[in-house]
Image (cartoon, rainbow, N blue to C red):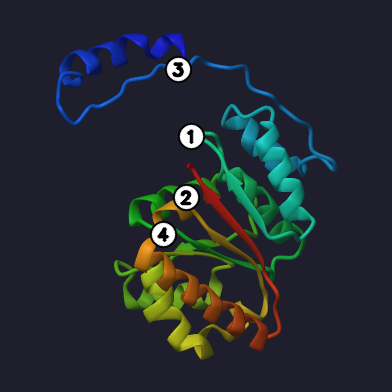
Amino acid sequence: MGRRYDRPMDEVVAIWGHEPEVVHIERVEARPGSTSPLDPPLQAVIEAALDERGITSLWRHQADAIASVRNGNHTVLVAGTASGKSLAYQVPIAEAIASEPKSTALCVYPTKALTNDQLRSFSRLGVDRLVASTYDGDTDTDARRWARRHANVLLTNPDMLHVGILPNHDLWKDFFHRLAFVVVDEMHTMRGIFGSHVAHVLRRLRRLAAHYGSDPTFVFTSAT
C-alpha cells in the first residue's frame, strides 16, 4: 500500500476496524513497477492516443500479454485491480482492426457498468475504423440492428450472449465469420453454477465461430 493511501485507510480502520466482520488487517508495502517495451512497438495512432491519457509506457504484464495475444495465443491475464489489464486485449484488437477493419471482436463483461466503461475506453484508442457498440438488455431495437450491421467490436454480457446473440446466429453470420477475438473480462466472477453456465455458452460460441469459418483468439482477465 503506497504512503499516499495511509491516511484514508487509517480512517477506514478507525471506523470499521472494530466490527466483528473484520477478522484481519494487513498492510502491503508498495513495490516498484517494472515496464517493458513492445516488439514491434505500438502503432503510432494508438501510441499517441495512449500518450494523451498519460500512458507513456507499458507494465511488463501488459507487454507480455499483448505479445501473447498478437501471436494468436489464447491468453489468461491475472493482475491486481486497476493494473491496466484492459490494454492487454484492447491494443491487439485495435491493431488488428486498424490493419484489417473487417476483423471483429466480442467482449463479454459481467456488468453493464463495466461494459459502458470499456465502451468509452475503446473509443479513446484513436482508431477511426474501430466501431464499438454495447449489446445488452438496455439496447433498443434500432440500436441492436445498427450494431449487427456496423459494429466490429461488440460489448455484451453472458446472459445476452446466451439468449440474444447465439440463438439468432444467422443474423450475426458475417460478424462470426470475421471473429478474431473473444474477451472474457473479470472471469473470477464467473464461478459455481454461473461459471459452468458461462463455460457451456463459450463452447457453443466456439462451435458457431467454427461453423462460420473463424477461429478466434480467447483472452481472459481476472483481478484475483
For marks 2 and 3, the one nearer the N-term is 3
Q: Quadrant of the N terminus?
A: top left
Q: Position of residue 13 (x, y in %)?
A: 24, 16
Residue drawn where x is 56% and y is 31% of the image: 53
**Residue under numbered circle 1:** 82
Say which amino acid is labelled 1.
Ala
Front disc: 4 or 1: 4
Q: Position of residue 26 (x, y in %)?
A: 38, 19
For marks 2 and 4, the one nearer the N-term is 2
**Residue under numbered circle 2:** 118
Mark 2 vs 4: CB contact within 8 A: no
* Secondary structure of residue under mark 1: loop
3D distance between C-alphas at marks 1 and 3: 13 Å
For marks 1 and 2, the one nearer the N-term is 1
Say which amino acid is labelled 2.
Gln
Residue 135 shows up from this direction? no
